[in-house]
Amino acid sequence: MRFRAAVMHEIGAPLAIEQVETTPLQAGDVMVRIRAASICHTDLDVLEGELSYPLPMVLGHEAAGVVAEVGPGVTTPAVGDHVVLSWNPHCGHCFYCEQNQPILCEPYVRNRARGLHFDGSHRLALNERPLHVLMYLGAFAEYCIVPAQSAVPVPSEIALDRACLIGCGVMTGFGAATHIAPVRWGSTVVVIGCGAIGLSAIQGARLAGAGSILAVDINDHKLEVAQALGATQLCNAEREDPAAMARAISHGRGADYVFEAAGNERAFRVSVETVRPGGQVVWLGKVNVQQQVSFRWGTLMGERRIVRSSYGGARPQRDFPRLARAYLQGELKLDELITRRIGLDGINEGFADLKSGQAIRTVIEFPA
Ligand SMILES: [Zn+2]
Ligand SMILES: [Zn+2]
């Protein structure tokens, strides 16, 4: 089968829309017709060479669609199911899976780094040469062949252009607040960085019953969105001191929980300066893997808990349908995260939007 995909050929160069070919489905494979895919910072990190992957590659790991075909042995999902894609399939029986840490699953981490399918082979080709995919998906394409575990059914009532957001940014931020921390009722929360992940951490904290939520960013529009999604105080870090504001709403102690979702050195420093002694910091952002990040030791003294999370403790089969239902019930807001809608041909503009810092999420829509 042939279909269109946005292919990354070299670091920093625009993606090229190409006709790619698939192999027949193998045992455990699912073919999903993509209906909506959004651009996440990790896609940009790969395009800019901040994360190193083999090329050529199809990026895209935050997407939703409809199951078009299933390979031998697949019982779930079924053809016609509406699915949100998960980028964390796992084997279920390695050292880390046995520790209940599927995000560290050994075959998962190994094959992910090589841009391969979960079984260590390719499913896509371009001009008869193997084509890699990002995080088992490669969703900037009309179709995606994924492990069955990665195609997670959600209620068909949720519009797929909203549902796609659940697959990475929303899960990561919401899960950080509700699974990793988890935020306790009445507590004081700071969220640094109001992109899709930070805004979802705000929503998770709100639904967990946080008493006050201070949103920090340098973009006033994003702070307005943060307020609409549950932030009770706003801090533009270009004009105000986040640590002083955190103390002002916590009897001078600092926040009980701080979520860092900005992905720069200053944000990591601010995260440990705004938490109270004995409080918890959850790091969600990332910088170049070679970059050093330094802290004044005094900001780490005493006692505090610092956790790094990449998928918010996701259990996609459990969490994606819950998040979809929370949206349908009006508890979780997703519409506010979408800044722009484009077609696959406009994908390079979508990347430019994200890089500019103006976009929260640009959604690529595919005709039904
Ligand atoms: Zn992502
Ligand atoms: Zn495993």
Image (tube, rainbow, N blue to C red):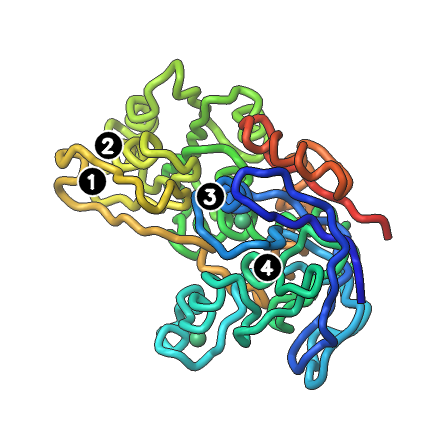
Q: Give the left or right position of residue 311, taking residue 361 as reference.
A: left
Q: Give the left or right position of residue 95, taking residue 312 as reference.
A: left
- Label 1 or label 2, whichever comes before in sequence order: 2
Gap in Å between the C-alphas at discs 2 and 3?
40 Å
Q: Position of residue 178 (x, y in %)?
A: 46, 53
Gap in Å between the C-alphas at discs 3 and 1?
37 Å
At mark 2, the secondary structure is loop
Are the residues tagged 2 and 3 within 8 Å (C-beta)?
no
Quadrant housing residue 236: top left
- Vertical position of residue 188 compared to residue 223: above or below: below
Residue at the bottom extreme of this rendering: 73
- Residue under the point 66% across and 55% down: 139
Quadrant housing residue 293: top left
- Label 4 or label 3, whichever comes before in sequence order: 3
Please name the residue that numbered disc 1 is placed on. 277
- Vertical position of residue 34 compared to residue 282: above or below: below
Quadrant housing residue 188: top left
Q: Position of residue 171 (x, y in %)?
A: 54, 52
- Vertical position of residue 192 compared to residue 162: above or below: above
- Amino acid beneath label 3: Gly
Residue at disc 2, CB closer than 8 Å to ligand 1: no
Residue at disc 4, CB closer than 8 Å to ligand 1: no
- Amino acid beneath label 1: Pro
Gap in Å between the C-alphas at discs 1 and 4?
43 Å
Q: Out of 330 and 90, give the one closest to the viewer.
A: 90
Please name the residue that numbered disc 3 is placed on. 49
Q: Which mark is residue 253?
A: 2
Residue at the top extreme of this rendering: 239
Please name the residue that numbered disc 4 is placed on. 133
Q: Out of 174 and 211, give the one closest to the viewer.
A: 174
Between label 4 and label 2, give the one nearer the viewer: 4
Q: Give the left or right position of residue 307, taking residue 329 as reference.
A: left
